[in-house]
Amino acid sequence: MDLEDVEAWIESSSPQQQKRKHSVISAMEPDAGSDTGSKRRRVDPRKDVTALNTRLTLISRPPGSQEGLSAESSSVKSRPRSPTRSMADLDSAVPPIVTREIDPDDEARLPQSVCRLRDSVRTYNRLRGALPSCIQSVITSALGNEFAEGFYFSSDERTSDTWLEFWREIQTVRENARLCSSEDKPEPSWGEEVVRPMLNLGIKYWRTARKTDWSENILFGIWISTNALIIPIDSPVAVGAENLTTAAISPQLAPKDARGCPFEFKKVDYGMFLALDPDSSQLIKERLQWLDFPDKSVNQTMAGYLRNKPLVMFMELKKANPGVNPVVQLGICASALLSRLNRLSHRDKTDFLPLPILQVVGHEWKVYYLHYSASEGVMLRGPEDIGSTLKRESMFQIIRVLGAIADYAVDEYWPWFKSNILQSSALHLDEGGEETVWATTP
């Protein structure tokens, strides 16, 4: 979190509000004159982001209101939270959060934007063309003649050396997945040993088809760091993966039940974000500059490493235990994200482009399609299978799907986001929730 943002926020307030806000900041600064043995813990706002966010959220609300405080805050009473243990609990959300499978009769009624995204994700459905033909002999030798048919293979601009490298890395991740399952490792192990490497492979697959001349990219300073790899690309935007296990939803975005009680906070595990060049990053800063601090984010969290990065996919990981359902976390996060975009754009949520949402239960990967329905609310359509880490051939499909999601993020979602979110009227939300137009992003 930048202190410049906090100072600008304070200066934009009335004298009385400034006094309240300065008192909060002062109370959190280290006490130079305090005894080193003092029992009271002093917080450095430059380092303790969580504590400062909690206090700033409190004073950004009308006097007497406790809404928006995190569940972890023990010093201030928060409103009761509605328990959320299953999708049935989310039926009472306002608006509802609905999960529904896509059957053949329903396909014709899907929004066209959802159909386009779904078609790109399903390009390699049932392994059709998922395997690279340039190393067909290697794959057939390892997997057997069952995969000798042309149905499973396709060619592209990547070289055989590139695909052989993918093949070796796939086998390493598959062995990690086998060990995670056989040794009953915890979810964090699955995440860092299986899911994160697969995300990195998907991004690597995407960039191998899009990188261009090195010197041109040096001139523009366009870089993305993914798992310690510094990669030049041919676009002002790229994609990167981030761990979201510590990134809480902004309190004011949490969906509420019919009584107005916010649902319990749920975090998801990983996300795919747009990484922007300096000019595009400046657009985001300009779009957020007039907003109060709790609204200075383009996604559902205020985490400093994420709030200026447009989210294009998020996912939840669970071990393959009976009764496990990761959809509750996905549904709450989806509702919060749409609320954020709605606050920034002030457009009808039905106009938003859909986003892919992934769930991983053990070895099995599935996708939902997030969009908004005027008659039904937040919609998660699916799930549909996109592959499994049990089988090497299926892992090629997962990688290709992740590449298709990255293509969608850069080629379709970013232009829409730039036009509909970043170039909307910049709004200031005052303490009473009233909105004032201050500027328009060019």
Image: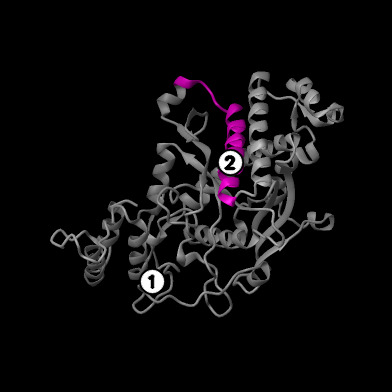
User: Where residue 428 appears, x then y in whole percent?
Assistant: 38, 62
Q: Residues within 10 Å of mark 1 (few under 14, many from 20)?
A: few
Of residue 395 and residue 409, the one placed in the foreground of this image is 395
Q: Say whether residue 123 is visible.
A: yes
- Based on the picture, tell me whether residue 207 belongs to the magenta stretch: yes
- Is 167 in front, or is 112? 167
Give, as a three-letter code, the residue at label 1: Ser
Secondary structure that dominates the magenta span: helix
Q: Secondary structure at mark 2?
A: helix
Mark 2 neighbour class, 10 Å CA radius: few under 14, some 14 to 19, many 20 or more? some
Number of marks in picture? 2
Instruction: Determine the residue located farthest toward the front in the rendered image.
Output: 183
Tell me the magenta residue range.
186-215
| Camera sees residue 346 | no
Position above or below: 410 against 154: below
Q: Camera-side residue: 426 or 303?
A: 303
Q: In which image quadrant can residue 106 be found?
A: bottom right
Q: Write the residue at 52% across / 57% down.
A: 341
Residue type pointed to by label 2: Glu
Residue at 41% x, 29% y: name it: 221
Classify mark 1: helix, strand or loop.
loop
Query: Mark 1 and mark 2: span between their CA atoms?
Result: 35 Å
Residue depicted at x 46% and y 66%: 251
* Magenta stretch: includes residue 381: no
Numbered badge on residue 74: 1
Pointer 2 residue: 193
